[in-house]
Amino acid sequence: MGAKQYEQAVIEKKKWLSDRMEEGLVFYRLDERAKVFIEYLPADKAWAPIAAPNYMYINCLWVSGKYKNQGYAKRLLDKCKEDAAALGMDGIVHIVGSKKLPYLSDKRFFEHMGFKVVDQADPYFELVALQLNESAALPAFKKMDENASVNEKGIVIYFSAQCPFAVGIVEELREVAVNKGVLFTAHRLITRDESQYAPVIWSTFALFYDGKFITHEIMSPNKFEKLLTTIL
């Protein structure tokens, strides 16, 4: 991804954040370069198909590189807990993976912090929750609409501006597919409703081929070209 392309993608991510802040999103960071940060907002405003009334939803918790294993993740989570409690919320909810994946939070950390798995969804998603009110209903994934399936041929990508890399890389992937004569369709999710009713749990980036889910990994053009070689 070129510098100008990435710069534009970052601008779009910042706009996405700004728009969500009007809906209650908090972006809190512990360093100036934003390598240690958390994003959270009321779960009814989440860009994910979950039912979690009066819960806070963690959209992203990120601790990068040298900042890992220094207690920063706990500090970020404590900030979210303080805000959720101050607002009288029933708990906090987050989407993790049943296995370790680069684009999902580590389930072990959240379990260590008292979260419990309350629901699961294919192929590897788990919903974890920390209850602040033990009598409150547990969150759950919304049932996928039977009509929300991917019927288009070729490569189909669903993505949103939640991650600048997703926005910035799509056109490069399109070029690779076109050069190989592969049909390519990209659906940008631009509203919360579109994300909640899309045929994906993880609306940041999802790639399908001939209707079959392939990956949520935001990959480089070179890696995408290798992927095409294996699935064609």
Image: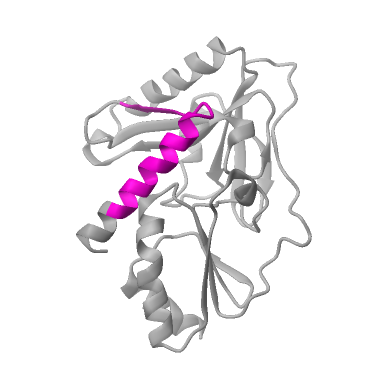
Q: Is residue 48 visible?
A: no
Q: Residue furthest right?
A: 146
The relative height of residue 212 versus residue 60 in the rendered view (above or below) is below
**Nearest the eye: 126 or 140:** 140
Chosen colour scheme: one colour
Number of numbered tags placed on the structure image: 0
At horizontal 64% and vertical 73% (from top left) the residue drawn is: 211
Q: Find out whether residue 196 is within the magenta segment.
A: no
Q: Which residues are magenta?
A: 8-29
**Nearest the eye: 138 or 32:** 32
Q: Is residue 60 left or right of residue 127?
A: left
Q: Is residue 117 left or right of residue 214?
A: right
Q: Is residue 214 left or right of residue 15?
A: right
**Nearest the eye: 217 or 29:** 29
The relative height of residue 96 versus residue 200 in the rendered view (above or below) is above
Q: Is residue 1 left or right of residue 215?
A: left
Q: Residue furthest bottom?
A: 181
Q: Where is residue 85 shown, x and y percent of the image?
A: 55, 13
Q: Where is residue 147 shown, x and y percent of the image?
A: 77, 62
Q: Where is residue 66 shown, x and y percent of the image?
A: 22, 37
Rendered image quadrant of residue 53: top right
Q: Main secondary structure of the magenta part?
A: helix
Q: In the picture, which quadrant includes the N terminus?
A: bottom left
Q: Find out whether residue 12 is within the magenta segment.
A: yes
Q: Where is residue 18 shown, x and y percent of the image?
A: 42, 35
At horizontal 46% and vertical 41% (from top left) the residue drawn is: 106
Q: Is residue 208 visible?
A: yes
